[in-house]
Image: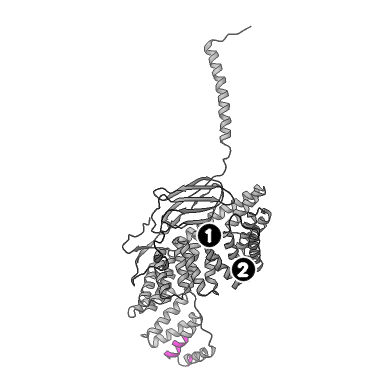
Amino acid sequence: MIFLYPPRLRFDRLTRLNLMVVSAFLLSLCGIAQEPAPPASIVHGVIRDADGKPVAQASILLRKEGSADNFTAHTDTQGRYSFTRLPDGVYSLRATKDGYGDAQVSAVFVGPQESKIVDLTLRVQQRSQESTTSDPQFSDQPQFTVGGVTDTTNLGGHGSDTVARTRNSLAKDTVSLGETTVKAPSDAAREKGLREIAELQPADFGANHQLGQLLIASGRAGEAIPFLERAATKDPANYENAYDLALANAQAGNYAVARDQATKLLATHDQADLHHLLGDVDEKLGDSLEAVRHYQRAAELDPSESHLFDWGAELLLHHIPEPAVELFSKGSRLFPSSARMLLGLGAAYFAGGAYDEAMQRICRASDLDPNDPVPYLFLGQIEQGGIAPSSDVVERLHRFLALQPQNADANYYYALGLWKLRNAAAEKRDIKQMESLLKTAIRIDPNHARAALQLGIVHSGQGAYNEAISDYRKALDADPQMEEAHYRLAQAYRQIGDSEKSKEELRVYGQLAKESAQKQDRERHEIKQFVYTLRDRPAPHVQ
């Protein structure tokens, strides 16, 4: 028996059948679309000039380490650029534009689906030979005015997170150069004699005052206070004793007391050393604006090397590199044999994104006293911070090694410089030399995490991933919080096919990177940023 359906019913059945087929096809497409996409990351940022203005139409070149992949972009009218859908890895980034010097960061670590901000500063190239061979001339009056402080949540950086950390570290190290004090040699016989006089004649001004000075000079400011107070009771108008009492309280940590004493003394004695002391005390009490004003007044009254240096260091600490460059430049002209002036100038140039100028000044500082390790350590920090060193820097680091062959840092920094100067066709003997230097550094200091990390990088570059894994593990044994070691270890595990360990190391890297960013934010809040105005120019915009 044959059943004949009406035409409309046959059409409905066929329609439903076709819809079922189409639906199944669409569902299969959806299933394909829902498969996990390859991890993609973003690198973006803003290119500015030395005045903080955006640089349009700058060329940006992004290169992936260990790959022939190159990416290019140009900045828009707001100086912005962006690279999207990037595979994770380690990249170098360079910004160029006619009329400006190049700016670059040699190591940007980008994790899976991570957004990385890298801001760079392009500086106008010098226009003549004369301008490249002499520092700008300044009048006795500073070309800037510090007008206040502001919240640092909007404080920008020059370069990657690593560069920003290096900038802050150099600023703090520069400040510490002004804090070094030399204790007077112990004079037990003189101290004993003064104590006996002060005990027998407690009202004797001279014995109490001299004993207080001796105790301050030997680093025992707390013990000096009662003797100086006795002397003040006998002769309250004596400036030297009053100053020493305020100094003793400052060194003993009684900052509020010291500020009160020094402020009262200032009403009748407008002295450079008193302003300098108040600068130290106000900084400890968190009143940075008053601190810089006192440092400035001290330098105006007595433009000594220490007063100019501390004024510049205070500006550098509070993230205004351009005025700091002005002061350290003037200090270097007035005191050409001062290595710390050149170090401060180098740190200020680095903070402003002028990396070549920074390295030149620090190299000059190392030439003043080749046996002083401090300039070499500044240079090492710069190359460790992701900035490609010049041949002059590597030459100085080689000298550091020659002078101190059993110094772990000397071996490490020279090896790192050689690695960063290498070309794609680095010969095996060069690689062996780097390996030998790094192994020597680790032998001298088994906890030298940075040397172990760099040895892993060298081995990874040669495809020796199992050796690299051992190196990275050694680096993490010395410093479990080292973000870069976790990241590179993840890449090495991926190369040998151990995806689970690779994922775990990436997870740890992500957590540490987040904690590091939070720590940097806290530190930025702790250090107030100055707002300043350059003469004949508007104040920088602060949101």
Q: Is residue 514 left or right of residue 150?
A: right
Frontmost of labels 1 and 2 is 1
Judge whether 244 appears above or below 86 on screen.
below
Judge whether 2 appears above or below 467 on screen.
above
- Name the outermost residue toward the left: 536
- Name the foreground residue: 1 vs 34: 34
The reply to whether residue 21 is visible in this rendering is yes
The reply to whether residue 285 is visible in this rendering is no
Q: Secondary structure at mark 1?
A: loop
Q: Position of residue 2 (x, y in %)?
A: 62, 7
Q: Position of residue 86 (x, y in %)?
A: 53, 46
Judge whether 192 appears above or below 266 on screen.
below
Figure quadrant of residue 201: bottom left
Question: Residue type at mark 1?
Answer: Ala
Q: Determine if the magenta segment contains residue 281.
A: no
Q: Magenta part mainly helix, strand or loop?
A: helix
Label at residue 388 = 1
Q: For the point 51% across and 47% down, which residue is it?
A: 71
Q: Quarter of the image containing the C terminus? A: bottom left
Q: Position of residue 393 (x, y in %)?
A: 53, 65
* Mark count: 2
- Name the foreground residue: 178 vs 284: 178
Question: Residue type at mark 2?
Answer: Ala
Q: CA distance from mark 1 to mark 2?
A: 21 Å
Q: Determine if the magenta segment contains residue 209.
A: yes
Q: Which residue is mark 2?
A: 408
